[in-house]
Image (cartoon, coloured by chain):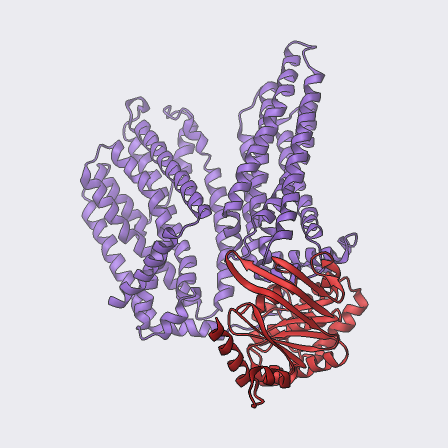
Chain colours: A purple, B red
Amino acid sequence: MKKIFLIWLIKLRSTYNDLKRMNREKAFKLVLFSGAGLFFIIFVHYFFLKIVRYVLSPEFGIELVGDVLITQLLSMINLTLFSVLVFSNIIASLSTLYISKDLDLLLSSPIKHSEVYVAKFFQSVVNSSYMVLVFGLPIYFALGRAFGEGMKYYLVMVSMFIPFVIIPASMGILFTMLLMRFFPAKRTYQIFTFMGMIFAAGLIIFFRFLRPETLYRDITDTAQPVFFDLLETMKVPQYQFLPSTWFTHVINDMVGIESNVFWPNILLLVFSAVISFVAVYCIAKRIYFSGFSQAFESKKRGRQMDIFRFSVFDRSFRYFETPQRAVLIKDLKTFFRDPTQWSQIFLLVSLIFIYLFSIQSIPADTLFLKNLTSFLNLGLAGFIISALAVRFVFPTTSLEGDAYWIIFSSPLSVKKFLWGKFIVFVIPIIFLGELLIVSSNFILRADFFFMMLSTITMFVISLTLTAMGVGLGAIYPRFKHENSTEIAGSFGGIIYMISSLIYVGMTAVILARPVYFYFMDKLYPGAFSWWSLLISITILILLNIFAFFFPMWRGVKNLESMEF
Amino acid sequence: MIEINELVKDYGKIRAVNNLNLKVEKGEFFGFLGPNGAGKTTTIKIMAGLLKPTSGVVNLGGFDIGTDMFKSKSISSYIPDRPFLYEKLTGREFLRFVSGLYRMDEIDTAKKTEELIETFSMAEWIDDMVEGYSHGMKQKLVMAQALIHDPEIIIVDEPMVGLDPRSIKLVKKIFKGLAKSGVTIFMSTHTLSHAQEMCDRIGIIHRGNLIAIGTINELMKTAHTKRMELEEIFFVLTEESSDEK
């Protein structure tokens, strides 16, 4: 037991040292993310508080329907949290129990393997559950406030989270341990990341199709089919063997929706947590270490099965100089061979899908509203492109990683290296930008002026955002990284997001005036000012010249003066 | 072929290389020795264009690395001490990628790749992904990439780390053959027996200063020792230098 604490203590010490010796970049990130996180928690809390209070309020009108809705909502949230917990424990335990760098030291020292397992079990639980705890508790606290519960409710709620988290953790960790008997660790990690992306994409689509905006419609009229639609949509299977169902019963009992179900369900939760932990511990004693060593023994050199023939690129890039072509083909091969990278395309597709679905759901009935939405859509699509660029374009220089010496000790100039990367990224980024804009304009049936305005502007935005991504990625490279998401979340990534949001915002503001005159012209013919359009276009050109060339120029300068 | 004049490199207040001057002739095998933190890797990284000198000039084949960087890089090769490579490429793809960086045409690349696969006995695993390679395999691949464009100068940092005895023997043979054919080799190593066996001349750097340079016989005189072992000479010189400080 002492040794388990020692392992935790080392982790705590490292975190403490990390915080103590934090540089400005890390401190900035910590403050920014904590602020954003806190804002989100408060938002979630008040959002649910409002919903629950509304459903319970007399103006909602229908007796008992409020309780049914709350139960359905709780079941949905609990089941989602439970599934997320199982899945994130599978991913986290793979890393903590099998890939973590300190394992060689721990497993070779005179500590029992089972003790290492227990320490790592709880590390996995913390790593995978704290986000669920942080975002789940505000929801349950909102429920407590809405029902006017006392201190006991909150204490029970917090302590109940422990067994609720232990059960999915045991399930997830057991699944990982069993898998590790058959697959090498690295490949399993890639498979899991790939599955994770599909799972996340599916989850996003699932929530979007629940059409949460329908909650704002008048559902008090039970004669309306929308009420039954909503109940039908929110129907979640209430399987009695699921810990999320026990959790829902306990909460329901505490707030008075159900009665006499508190003790049976809380006992079920606690006993199941203890039994699952002990059972998985016993299994781990038998299979954890053998799985650990077997997994790495079975690591074989793999011949690559490519999704498509890369010789296509040889022909497509024939107009590039030989060194640039070499870098581009290398980048594409490494991207498409790494499931942790290309699987994010699933997220991207689901994002576009949701985007267009949401555009379609906007109740823009008049021509004015359609055109206005089309214009505002330009800004929104710009933000989406920034979000994609920070994930795919910005990390491009950093992804050279520890192999940077190959490029930078070769006779390929930094300028050609960066411009080559720009050209490869700009084509898909323009394609995506135009796809979002043109298809949403078609859905909205925007008129010719808006169609042209947004198509041309999106073309320019895509060019500039790509240049900003490549340029800022070279100004703030992060060659030492564990994975590419870490690069997007770095200080430079945040700077990119902030500057691209400012850029897209400025573009919308600059275009707002000619758009205003266009609308006025529709009401009072002859009000359109060509001068206004010309001035806006001039300012836009100047803004784009600056936003396009400055980061690229600084990026080249930075890499040229950089010491490796 | 290699000329280093008054080279200085500071990391903040710490001087890593202090006024280094040396000249290596064409076809010469030069060994660069020194204890940990002496300034060997810093010097090598400056020569490879990965670090900028605080002051001084490095000339490779008549091209100043500061002003004619691309020309000097195109006639030289760098082999780092730790072989970090692109894990998702196969060995063959990696060689092709490097040949592209040096503007080699397809026919030469294919010919040279086959030649290197044969030389380094890589046929069995060259079409596997780098992520599954052992340290020794990676090291062989890094050496092969360094030779693919027939460089005139090879700058190499600790080449034997992680290699098995057979591979070490092979690398020694290849490097000696290259030097004989006119390639200049600048090698940093901790393995003194290798340096003694392979190098024509040896430079010893300690705390950023070049404290001795010459053939083994010349170094013996500098160290005032009658023993021919480089190990003995090295300890005498580096200890003397430490005492002087």
Q: Classify A247 as above or below A335.
A: above
Left or right placement of residue A83 versus residue A259 in this view? right
User: Residue B52 placed where, x, y %?
Assistant: 62, 57
B184 lies above or below A464: below
How many numbered circles does the render carry? 0
A266 left or right of A331 in image: left
Q: Quadrant of the C terminus of chain A?
A: bottom right
* Residue A216 placement (x, y as % from top left): 42, 27
Q: Is residue A336 above or below residue A460?
A: below
Residue A342 visible: no
Q: Which x, y percent locates residue A332?
A: 65, 56
Instruction: List x then y, in percent, for residue B235.
Output: 51, 81
Residue at x-position 55% and y-position 56%:
A479
Q: Residue at x 45, y 46 (%)?
A: A24
Residue occupying the point 59% across, 23% down: A372
Which sits in the foreground, A187 or A199?
A187
Q: Quadrant of residue B171?
A: bottom right
User: Which quadrant of the view contains residue B204?
Assistant: bottom right
Q: Toward the viewer: B143 or B227?
A: B227
